Image (cartoon, rainbow, N blue to C red):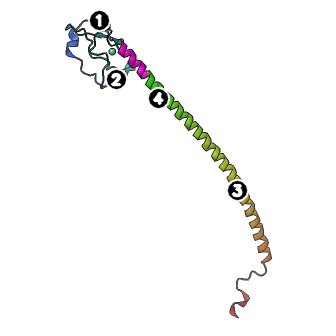
Amino acid sequence: MGEATPPLKENKMKTSIQKGHCQVCGSVQRIHNNGTNKIFNHGFTRSGGFGYWTSAPCWGSSHQALEISCDIVEDTIARAYDIIEKIEVRVTAQEEEKLRLELEAEEALFIAEEEQIKLKEENKKLEKELDELLKEESTDENNNEDSADPVPNNIHS
Ligand SMILES: [Zn+2]
């Protein structure tokens, strides 16, 4: 991002030596010296050395400097309140979603723990059954030891 090329600035900007404050962002910018006192396009540079915005310039571009007019200041304040409201709605929605997910996770954990207890009991029961089967088998083996003839006696009769 740091190596991005800056957007083309207006050519006449270099010929202007007058400056004024932007009504929207409050930065000091050059103003047109053609009698309109409008601020040149600006707002492409991101703060913190993060390169340049590729599209929209500051909303205060092409409006008169604050020293000349305050005609869009009220709009700017209203816009800021509008943005605050939108952000608050988003934050509330995110908090609700977070709460919902936490409840869902808690419920899932509860169900998993219940299931685990059930499985442990089942496992115990099966182990007991297996023990009994093994016991039975070993007594069967002991009882059948003598009669365990691979060829039954009555096979040829
Ligand atoms: Zn501005």
Circle nearer the N terminus (3, 2): 2
Residue that numbered label 4 is attached to: 90
Q: How many marks?
A: 4
> Residue beneath label 1, please?
68
Disc 1 versus disc 3: nearer the observer: 1
Helix, strand or loop for disc 2? loop
Identified by mark 2, the residue type is: Gly
Q: Is residue 101 left or right of residue 64?
A: right
Mark 1 or mark 3: whose residue is earlier in sequence:
1
Quick check: can you spot residue 106?
yes
Magenta residues span 74-83
Would you call the spot at circle 2 few (<14 residues within 10 Å), some (14-19), or many (20 or more)?
Answer: some
Task: Confirm or deny contact between disc 2 and disc 4 (CB under 8 A).
Answer: no
* Quarter of the view holding residue 26: top left
For the residues labelled 3 and 2, the Cα–Cα distance comes to 63 Å
Question: Residues under labels 2 and 4: Cα distance?
Answer: 28 Å
* 36 lies above or below 44: above
The image quadrant where one finds the C terminus is bottom right
The answer to whether residue 31 is above or below residue 140 is above
